[in-house]
Amino acid sequence: MAKATIIKVETPAELYCHIQGHEPQPCYIEVDLEAGTISATYDPEIGGGVPKSVWTGHVRRFRIPPLTADAANTIMEKIKPLVEIMLDHWEEEWDGSDWWAHLLPAGIRAQEQISELVEEDTDYWLPEDVVFPLEDIDWFPYVKDEVTARTTDEQLEELAHRTVKDLEMGVPSGVLPEGSYDDIVERLMDYRDELKEEEEEEDAE
């Protein structure tokens, strides 16, 4: 029987990617029939372009939410026996220009079982399984009063660290997107600079 290799998700928020001006990138579990691997990743293509390996069937995708690393690694372990059935039951066909991968009946059944579990069961994923988007948290009103026109960069950075820790404690999964700290620092510095400009305008009058 074929043995599948799981490529683990290493960092807690690795699967969450939100490019400014676009919706968050879709996430997938990918089964590579040729390499015998199971991985979890977000789609790097804006607009959802399909890689050739997916188009030809050599890589099978299963849509998932932006899971935390722990949740993603756990589900990959859970579906591993089904993936190994897929790896044992597929074949290639040459159509004159490309090789196409086709699952045999047992492989199709295994793929359907994976899809039923990770894609179709809407109750399977809990809030604590998913990276919590920073933009869904109205955090700024709770910290703005700690910022003045004379607050230093170092003080703002410390405030941002405390804010991240507080937010992580408050969201179900305890995981915010990578870059949340930088986004909070930037917002706090912009606000500090706005206060400076207001003071300067008042002094000039």
Image (tube, grey):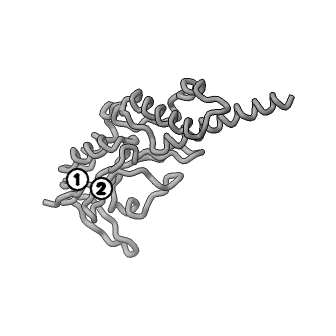
Q: Is residue 145 left or right of residue 129?
A: right
Mark 2, residue position: 31
The image shows residue 149 at horizontal and vertical percentages of: 67, 32
In which quadrant is the N terminus drawn?
A: bottom left
Estimate how packed mark 2 is, as few (under 14), some (14 to 19) or many (20 or more) residues with alpha carbons within 10 Å: many
The image shows residue 181 at horizontal and vertical percentages of: 49, 40
| Residue type highlighted by circle 1 | Val
**Residue closest to the eye, 168 or 194:** 194
The image shows residue 190 at horizontal and vertical percentages of: 65, 38
User: Are dots 2 and 1 in contact, CB under 8 Å?
Assistant: yes
Estimate how packed mark 1 is, as few (under 14), some (14 to 19) or many (20 or more) residues with alpha carbons within 10 Å: many
- Marks 2 and 1 sit apart, C-alpha to C-alpha, by 7 Å
Mark 1, residue position: 83
| Residue type highlighted by circle 2 | Val
Residue drawn at x 25%, y 54% is: 6
The image shows residue 74 at horizontal and vertical percentages of: 25, 43
Which one is earlier in the sequence, the residue at label 2 or at label 1? 2
Residue drawn at x 55%, y 36% is: 155
